[in-house]
Amino acid sequence: MSSSLNKIPVEVSLYEKTEKVYPRETAGRFQSLRSVSMYALLGLYYILPWIPWGERQAVLFDLPARKFHIFFLTFWPQDFFFLTLLLILAGLSLFFFTAIAGRVWCGFACPQTVWTEAFVRMERWVEGSRAKQMKLTQAPWTFDKVRKRVTKQFLWITFALFTGLTFVGYFQPVKELFPAFFSFELGGWALFWVIFYGFATYGNAGFMREQVCKYMCPYARFQSAMFDKDTLIVAYDEQRGEPRSRGKRRKGDETETAAKGDCIDCGICVQVCPTGIDIRDGLQYECIACAACIDGCDEVMKRVGLPVGLIKYSTQAQNQGSGKSLKQTVLRPRVLIYGTLLAMVFIGFISALVMRSSFQVDILRDRNALYRWSKTNDIENSYQVRVMNKSQLDQGYTVAVRGLEGASADWGKTSEAGRSRVVQAGDIGEFIVIITLPATANYQRSQDIELYFSETVGKSPSSIAEESRFWGPAKRN
Ligand code: SF4
Ligand code: SF4
């Protein structure tokens, strides 16, 4: 009998249904910090494309023209080096700040956190507090429920589309984009990206929320490689919270106070957590260090007349009673190495930016003829030249040749030959340069030369020397 019962198959579901997290509203110093961060970052994102800079917008990633404008700087594909440095800087910053303060980026500045916070606030505004939201979810579909749900979805979708539209405004002139969108004249790729980015915003911040941090973000997975025992984390003081047990007690009841720790097991720290975890279970990879549980618990501690800080920023070493000061914690080898590397790359980046030439020249030798004879029987070589004016001024350029005695360089033989060539600010000029050498001069059949270009406008005009080759006929003995 018992052996046949043992054979009855038992179904075990490998799929666990996701429980929606309804974060409770908190108030406190970290909540204020998160609000400031959210408004500052959202404000920056939505306002930046609208700031004018001369005849263009201050920040414009002009992909068709392959130019990135950031205020007074214009970057070209040739400036890829700066993008590389920026990515290295971003990576090192992540290592540096994570080594000091754990996932502080996730809790206060990550776009996922910032936009989720905005969506959560809209939800709270329409549906009310955490308890009301949970009640509404359980309630049958009444007119009031439909009204609230439709209003929330309308706000979310409008905000998401506005976010998508602003995103595209970084790549297309925003003053043309918005009128085109609202007059239904926007089409093609621009419309696709508005909807795609809007959909991504809605999906990440309205629908998936903490699931992105828990299951999709790679940072949560490799953070342990950057953590050590001296990294600041949000931690529950277990020694104080539950030396024997946790649990509810009456204020001022000494018997209960002696029997229990300071945690009254109110569950507020769990209710305010945007990822729905219980920090009392110890450090978990789902914790984004937003410190909402610190604010929540501090409020509770004040209400029951106990000192705040049952949940606080501390380190594993401090929790184990290492007795290290904050200075000793911060000034440890790992942080100093990351900090030094970060400072070096930062100085390199700024120096490269300051020393960056205001123009760039690409030279291509004429491939049709190695050389040709002029009407006056001189030897001529021809070069196609692209001059990129990276500055914010219309600029003139002159050309000269070095390394070939007796030779002269000039712009193509037009009526304007001998004068400088002008390239408009942020534009590319394409020209022909001719090097002329008297046949009687002393030359080799092929030799290295330098084409020397100089700016003609401004207080400290720059110059650039570019190498190329000069060819002449073989000399007869
Ligand atoms: S908020 Fe503080 S007192 Fe309440 S359960 Fe969490 S740790 Fe305990
Ligand atoms: S445990 Fe605390 S710090 Fe971590 S995510 Fe939850 S509320 Fe934020």
Image (spheres, rainbow, N blue to C red):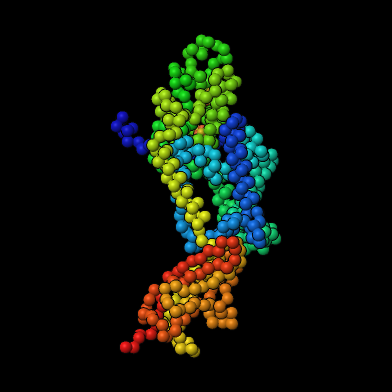
**Residue 372 to residue 158: above or below:** below
At a point 35% along the width and 86% down the height, the residue shown is: 475
Residue at far left of view:
3
Residue 188 or residue 113, whichever sits in front: 113
Quadrant containing the C terminus in the rendered view: bottom left
Q: Residue 419's spot in the image, x, y percent?
A: 58, 76
Q: Residue 312's spot in the image, x, y percent?
A: 50, 28
**Residue 309 to residue 171: above or below:** above
State left or right for residue 218 relative to residue 189.
left
Is residue 226 among what the camera can see? no
Is residue 376 among what the camera can see? yes
Looking at the rendered structure, the number of numbered marks drawn on it comes to 0
> Which picture quadrant has residue 325?
top left
Q: Residue 63's spot in the image, x, y percent?
A: 55, 62
**Residue 189 to residue 292: above or below:** below
State left or right for residue 271 relative to residue 231.
right
Quadrant containing the N terminus in the rendered view: top left
At a point 40% along the width and 34% down the height, the residue shown is: 332
Residue 324 or residue 243, whichever sits in front: 324
At a point 29% along the width and 32% down the height, the residue shown is: 3
At a point 57% along the width and 68% down the height, the residue shown is: 456
> Which picture quadrant has residue 30?
top right
**Residue 419 to residue 99: above or below:** below
Residue 212 or residue 137, whichever sits in front: 212
State left or right for residue 183 relative to residue 338.
right
> Which picture quadrant has residue 338?
top left
Q: Residue 275's spot in the image, x, y percent?
A: 51, 36
